Image (cartoon, helix red, strand yellow):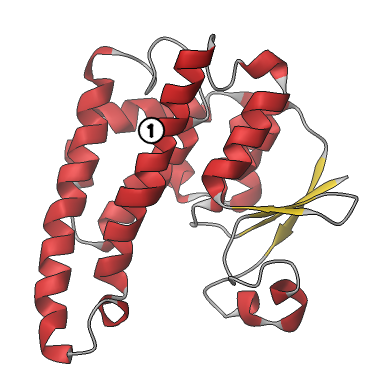
Amino acid sequence: MLTLYYCPYACSMASHVALEEAGIAFEAHKVNIFTGEQLKPDYLAINPRAKVPALAFDDGRVLLETVAILGWIGQNHLDGELLGTDALERSRTLAFCAWLSGAVHPTFKQFIHPEQFAGDVAAHAAIKAQAKETYWSQLQEIDAVLADRPWVMGERFTLADPYALVFYPWGRELGLPVKELTHLAAMNERLIARPGARRALEREKSVLLTMSKR
């Protein structure tokens, strides 16, 4: 059986939801990255990068990185429909996920850990200020995508949707007015209404549930 290593409030939530939506049997193993469990030898043997998510297979192989895990789940289950209805749409879904991973997530990290981007403490305030501004524009961009559609890619749910919602509550950590993101809030309601997604969110005691009107 597959094992997903995850941490609540981390980007691993997207993979957690994806496994449930795909109907895949798996074990969920919590790794508390906020108390340093990812740095323990047992977990470093699974993921030397000390991050979540990690998806371990029965044969000992491990798949790392959210985009890769979402891609594997989407391409190999439910006839690929969790990524889209044809090859181009699936590629566009993965492109959106790559933007979340390669641009949005690093922006948040700049705000939380400016010391990783500049050794000069005097530069940290400027890094945080720029990261906050950029992150807000990125959240607004996601919100605008949803202005005329229920899901990121259009009328159909894809694995880009739970990944996009990872970044929605993180905006509160930066003191951003996330209540203005009405389209993201509406998509959150739709995600919570999906039985598979809700199982994952309830297992994690996700903050998305507390942000819901339900």
Q: Relative to 175, does residue 118 appear above or below in the rendering?
A: below
Q: Residue, x 54% and y 47% (percent of image)?
A: 66
Residue 190 appears in the rendering: no
Q: Relative to 93, does residue 63 appear above or below in the rendering?
A: below
Residue 95 image position (x, y, % from top left): 40, 32
Residue 195 image position (x, y, % from top left): 64, 26
Count the marks. Answer: 1
Residue 100 as seen in the image, left or right of residue 147: right
Q: Nearer the viewer, residue 78 or 177?
A: 78
Residue 3 image position (x, y, % from top left): 79, 51
Residue 115 as seen in the image, left or right of residue 187: left
- Look at mark 1 in the image and give the residue it sits on: 96
Q: Residue, x 66% and y 48% (percent of image)?
A: 203
Residue 125 image position (x, y, % from top left): 12, 78
Q: Nearer the viewer, residue 64 or 124?
A: 64
> Where is the C terminus found, in terms of image quarters?
top left
> Where is the N terminus found, in terms of image quarters?
top right
Residue 58 appears in the rendering: yes
Q: Residue, x 63% and y 27% (percent of image)?
A: 74
Secondary structure at numbered mark 1: helix
Q: Relative to 6, does residue 121 appear above or below in the rendering?
A: below
Residue 148 as seen in the image, left or right of residue 1: left
Q: Nearer the viewer, residue 76 or 135?
A: 76
Q: Relative to 61, does residue 159 appear above or below in the rendering?
A: above
At label 1, the amino acid type is Phe
Q: Quadrant of residue 25?
A: top right
